[in-house]
Amino acid sequence: MQKIEWSEIQNDIHKLCTKIIDTSNCLTDNIIAVGRGGLIVATLIAYRLNIPKIHNYGLSSYTYNNQPGNITEYQLPNFLHLENKKVLLIDDLSDKGNTLRHVTNNLNEQCIDHSTCTLYIKNGTSFMPDFYSRVFPDDVWISFPWDL
């Protein structure tokens, strides 16, 4: 298990925001956060980049004992509010890549122009986000400060 401290989160968020700012075509005033863990990362990025609107895309893809499961959606953003807008899709981690692929496919179906961002990725992810700060081995469980 890799325990991540808040100071590391802050440094990695700073790195991510620098990358996003350096890619001017990714600047936006709308974020879609993949709830739950992505909401925390999205909020930190939104404050740093002064992005006022965060929309939740609530879904679950892990069981209560942290095993991969089926993707279940429980809250969708109002896609009408995102038409003709550039959106930044944010999650905490691209582990296998299934969750981000699912959300991205839905955004593409809705013709929502978006870039993708995760705090971290794992080596074997099948979904490579446009922005991320660090890479971890596949076999490492990442423990975020907000995890119980």
Image (spheres, helix red, strand yellow):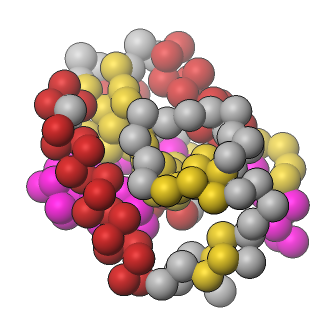
Which of the pair 95/138 is nearer the observer?
Answer: 138
Q: Is residue 96 left or right of residue 106?
A: right
- Against 104, residue 108 (above or below) is above
Magenta residue span: 40-67
Can residue 34 be seen? yes
Can residue 29 be seen? no
Rendered-image quadrant of the N terminus:
bottom right
Which residue is rendered at x = 87% and y = 72% of the image? 65
Which residue is rendered at x = 31% and y = 32% of the image? 87
Rendered-image quadrant of the C terminus:
bottom right
Tell whether position 59 is magenta: yes
Which residue is rendered at x = 53% and y = 14% of the image? 109
- Against 130, residue 75 (above or below) is below
Residue 84 sits in quarter: top left
Question: Residue 79 at x, y = what percent?
Answer: 39, 28
Which of the pair 13/114 is nearer the observer?
Answer: 13
